[in-house]
Amino acid sequence: MRILIIEDEPELARHISRALGRHEHLVTAKYDGVEGLRVALADPPDLIVLDLGLPDMDGLELLATLRREHCSSRVIILTARGEVEHRVRGLKAGADDYLSKPFSLDELIARVEAMGRRGATPKAVDLLRTADLTMDVQHRRVTRSGRVITLSPREFDVLQVLMQEPGRVFSRTELCERVWRREHEYDTRTVEIFITRLRKKVDMHFDLPLIHTQRGQGYTVRDPERPAAAGRADASPPPTEGAS
Ligand code: CA
């Protein structure tokens, strides 16, 4: 992967560069926000490792600018320990993952490799749709019938997995693996909690439920008025209209 490190501590930036370089990534390091932002926008890398505490520019502001300028590089943010608020704001501003300082280089490598497995290039589909539910992947914005639905980053991730393949049933285990990735962090009951929360936000105020439980199998997002999986060739006849 092509990786850009934006980190003002030169020693740390060098350690990270060397470690990632050993894993055959192509690494560039910039030591301040202005220069980092310029490089990121001029030639977006696959991944940006972004320190939030930069001397010349707020890392969160930098991140927001990247997303506003439609830079779809994946971003891992580095935060000083205990800055929970920053971490949350970072994820909301469009970061894909975070590490709290101090962190081990092994941990960073593991996160980077996980990012690589999720696909180094930006998603081909930036707008996902099921019935009147719309997800703007790039800006992490969800609306239903034009009404904005505010989701936490993880709620968004769960919904995104489901919406990427409408009609496909995902087991709890598979959802866990897709969304949480790191084994120690989840158990499958977590998924139930997230589905419940998503239902409240996505379905509760609308007549047509879009999140469905397939008993004993898992969960799916689909438009019940369009039984055939969207976008797939299917021999079944189109749904009849006006049946009610
Ligand atoms: Ca710093």
Image (spheres, rainbow, N blue to C red):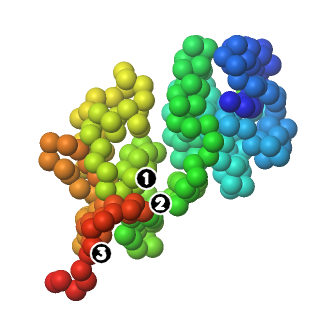
* SS at badge 2: strand
Q: Residue drawn 56% across and 38% down?
A: 119
Q: Is mark 1 within 8 Å of ligand 1?
A: no
Crowd tier of the residue under label 1, counting other residues whose Cα lies within 10 Å: few below 14, some 14–19, many 20 or above: some
Mark 2 = which residue?
128
* SS at badge 1: helix
Label 2 vs 1, first from the N-terminus: 2
Crowd tier of the residue under label 3, counting other residues whose Cα lies within 10 Å: few below 14, some 14–19, many 20 or above: few
Q: Farthest residue to the bottom: give it.
A: 242
* 149 vs 66: above or below: below
Q: Residue drawn 75% across and 43% down?
A: 44
Instruction: From the viewer's side, name the closer residue of 186 and 55.
Output: 186
Q: Position of residue 19 (x, y in %)?
A: 69, 14
Whether pointer 3 and pointer 2 mark residues with C-beta atoms closer than 8 Å, the reply is no
Residue 45 visible from this viewpoint: yes
Q: Residue drawn 74% across and 14% down?
A: 18
Label 3 vs 2, first from the N-terminus: 2
Q: Residue drawn 80% across and 37% down?
A: 36
| Image quadrant occupied by the C terminus | bottom left
Question: Residue 184: which quarter of the image?
Answer: top left
